[in-house]
Image (spheres, helix red, strand yellow):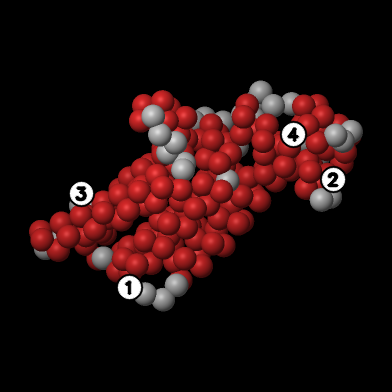
């Protein structure tokens, strides 16, 4: 593993544990056993390092979500694929949702996150509008559906420690993650059936 990759790994761990403001370049350098000057050499500043951590996550996430979206199948199956892919990504990259949620609550890198989210959000909106024209407006508008499902997915990971205390069971265990996916599929099925029933 290169020094750059080691620094990114240490930064990911510390930004996840402490957040951008609390984690220092010195701590990150010590975590991976390199000189602080090497961090600045590769990334320019703590901001540059943080943005590299974010960019690395979003480049991988964008690629796998796009692949899931473009898989052949009915629209509902493609949406299920996206839900499952997103869940799997968050399960395998547990610091990601913690880092993003902290910054999304008023952090200085909020705009960087928004820039990453806009293209994928727009593509997901188009998929819903094309497959289900009823979602173009009203109380089941695509914008609301995407925000609702985003919240149902991300909150499960950002609140995992609290949920374990509430339920007495690890929400990130293989069994519980599979159960969460089934629940989200059921929620989507229920919404789609309501669209058909109401003629929306």
Mark 3 or mark 1, which is nearer to you?
1
Q: Residue at x 58, y 46 (%)?
A: 93
Closer to us: mark 4 or mark 2?
Answer: 2
Specify few, some or many for label 3: CA neighbours under 10 Å numbering under 14, 14-19, or 20 or more: few
**Residue 140: percent from left, percent from top:** 23, 52
Q: Tell me: 189 left or right of 93.
A: left
Badge 4 vs badge 1, beta-carbon distance below 8 Å? no
Q: Residues within 10 Å of mark 2 (few under 14, many from 20)?
A: some
Question: Can residue 126 be seen in the rendering of this structure?
Answer: no
Element at badge 1?
A: loop
Gap between marks 4 and 3 measured at Cα: 43 Å
Q: Which residue is mark 3?
A: 139
Q: Residue 14: x and y, percent?
A: 68, 31
- Give me the disc on residue 46: 4
Residue at 31% across / 66% down in the picture?
76
Residue placed at 34% from the left, 67% from the top? 77
* Left or right position of 78 against 48: left
Disc 3/disc 2 C-alpha distance (Å)? 51 Å
Q: Which residue is mark 1?
A: 74
- Please tell me which of labels 4 and 2 falls first in the chain: 2
- Alpha carbon of mark 3 to alpha carbon of mark 1: how far? 24 Å
> How far apart are the alpha carbons under marks 4 and 1?
44 Å
Residue ID for mark 2: 3
* Disc 4 and disc 3 in contact, CB within 8 angstroms: no
Nearer-N-terminus badge (4/1): 4
Q: Residue 167 in the image: x percent, y percent?
A: 35, 30
Residue 23 shown left or right of residue 183 in the figure: right
Q: Nearer the viewer, residue 114 or 42?
A: 42
């Amino acid at each position: 593993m290169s020094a750059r990759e080691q620094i990114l790994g240490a930064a990911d761990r510390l930004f996840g544990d402490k957040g951008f403001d609390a984690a220092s370049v010195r701590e990150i350098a010590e975590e991976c056993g390199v000189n602080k000057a090497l961090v600045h050499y590769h990334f320019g500043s703590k901001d540059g390092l943080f943005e590299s951590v974010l960019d690395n996550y979003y480049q991988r996430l964008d690629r796998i979500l796009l692949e899931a979206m473009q898989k052949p199948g009915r629209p509902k199956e493609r949406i299920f694929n996206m839900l499952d892919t997103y869940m799997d990504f968050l399960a395998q990259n547990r610091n990601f949702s913690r880092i993003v949620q902290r910054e999304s609550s008023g952090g200085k890198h909020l705009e960087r996150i928004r820039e990453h989210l806009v293209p994928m959000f727009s593509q997901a909106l188009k998929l819903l509008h094309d497959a289900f024209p009823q979602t173009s407006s009203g109380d089941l508008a695509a914008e609301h559906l995407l925000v609702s499902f985003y919240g149902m997915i991300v909150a499960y990971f950002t609140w995992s420690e609290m949920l374990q205390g509430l339920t007495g069971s690890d929400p990130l265990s293989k069994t519980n993650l599979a159960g969460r996916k089934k629940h989200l599929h059921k929620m989507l099925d229920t919404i789609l059936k309501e669209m058909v029933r109401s003629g929306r």
